[in-house]
Image: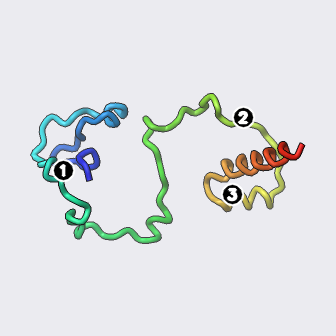
Amino acid sequence: MNKSNMSNSSNNSLDKTPDMQALGTQPRTHSRTDWERLDALSDAEIDTSDIPPLTEGEFARSEWRLPAALKPSLFPPDAPVMVEIAIDKETLAWFQSQGQDYQVQMRAALRLYAEVHQASD
């Protein structure tokens, strides 16, 4: 574990690293934490006994989210083109049952179909 992953409970600002600068985080001005000692610890040496284990249910409810500063722009140059098409309810329901990124999966399926058929032309 390194100091960019940790914060001092008495001082919540984080150490200044290039990634933190990109996110606009201010450098820590003073800390009583012995960062060198912490950086030297192996994962096995870190006492996590006071942290309850996560359950499968908690993992199932979790979502991956990027900080706003790291999110891609809403319409990058290679963004998909928005179109409106009619799809039968059963097909749409199946893709939606595959997860929140069902539209990405639909685009991938259409791309694969097009690539296969372009190769056979």
Q: Which mark is residue 81?
A: 2
Q: Is residue 17 above or below residue 62?
A: above
Q: Amino acid at mark 1?
A: Ser
**Residue 66, horizontal then vertical, whole percent:** 46, 44
Q: Disc 3 on helix, strand or loop?
A: helix
Whether residue 100 sits left or right of residue 32 in the image: it is: right
Question: Which residue occupies 75% across, 45% down?
Answer: 111
**Image quadrant where residue 67 sits:** top left
Quadrant of residue 30 within the rendered picture:
top left
Q: Position of residue 4 (x, y in %)?
A: 27, 44
Closer to viewer: mark 2 or mark 1: 2
Residue for badge 1: 9
Lower sequence index among marks 2 and 1: 1
Mark 1 or mark 3, earlier in chain? 1
Amino acid on which the number 3 mark rests in the picture = Gln
Residue 82, above or below 35: above
Of callouts 2 and 3, the N-terminal one: 2
